[in-house]
Image: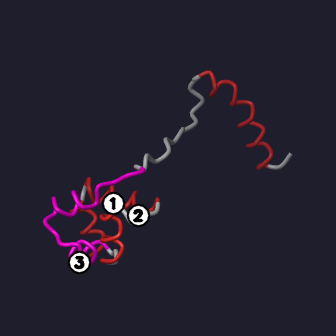
Amino acid sequence: MTKASDRIHEGALEVPAFARGDDTGAVAHEPAQVPDDINIKAIREKLELSQAGFAMQYGFTTHSIRNWEQGSRKPPLQARAFLKVIEKNPKAVREALTA
């Protein structure tokens, strides 16, 4: 067998033990928990920013911020994830975006 097929075979043999919860050395990653709804206005107001200021600081368009806050459009998954990060640590996001 090839190295790749050996690794696949070894992994397949570990499946029952992993399913039982035995320590196989495998690392299980939890999926991201992206909220369906996010209160953009509350995040923005906590940061004391206008719609235009929030959009400029975090790379959105003012039009998008307005539409999301008014409920006429819903932010896509990636934007909701980013907004959640902004909500949790706006300083780190600003540092990353201005570095």
Q: Is residue 81 above or below residue 50?
A: above
| Number of residues whose C-alpha sits closer than 10 Å to that of mark 3, classed few (under 14), some (14–19) or many (20 or more) | some
Q: Residue furthest right?
A: 1
Image position of 49 (left or right of 14): left
Kindly report the distance in space between the C-alpha atoms of the residues bearing marks 1 and 2: 6 Å
Residue at screen point 24% across, 69% down: 95
> Which residue has dot 1 on it?
83
Residue at screen point 32% across, 57% down: 85
Residue at screen point 78% across, 42% down: 6
> Which residue has dot 2 on it?
79
Q: What x and y, as percent, mark residue 31?
A: 50, 45
Q: Which residues are magenta?
A: 36-58
- Queried whether the magenta region covers residue 81, the answer comes back as no
Query: How many labels, in total?
Result: 3
Q: Would you say the residues marked 1 and 2 are in contact, meaning their CB atoms lie under 8 Å apart? A: yes
Q: Nearer the viewer, residue 82 or 2?
A: 82
- Tell me, for residue 52, which label it has, or none: 3
Q: Is residue 17 above or below residue 9?
A: above
Q: Is residue 97 above or below residue 31?
A: below
Residue 99: tell me if it is visible: no
* Amino acid type at mark 2: Ala
Res. 58 image quadrant: bottom left
* Amino acid type at mark 1: Leu
Res. 94 image quadrant: bottom left
Mark 1 lies on a secondary structure that is helix
Of pointers 3 and 2, the one earlier in the residue sequence: 3
Image position of 94 (left or right of 48): right
Q: What x and y, as percent, mark residue 57?
A: 25, 74
Q: Is residue 55 above or below residue 88?
A: below
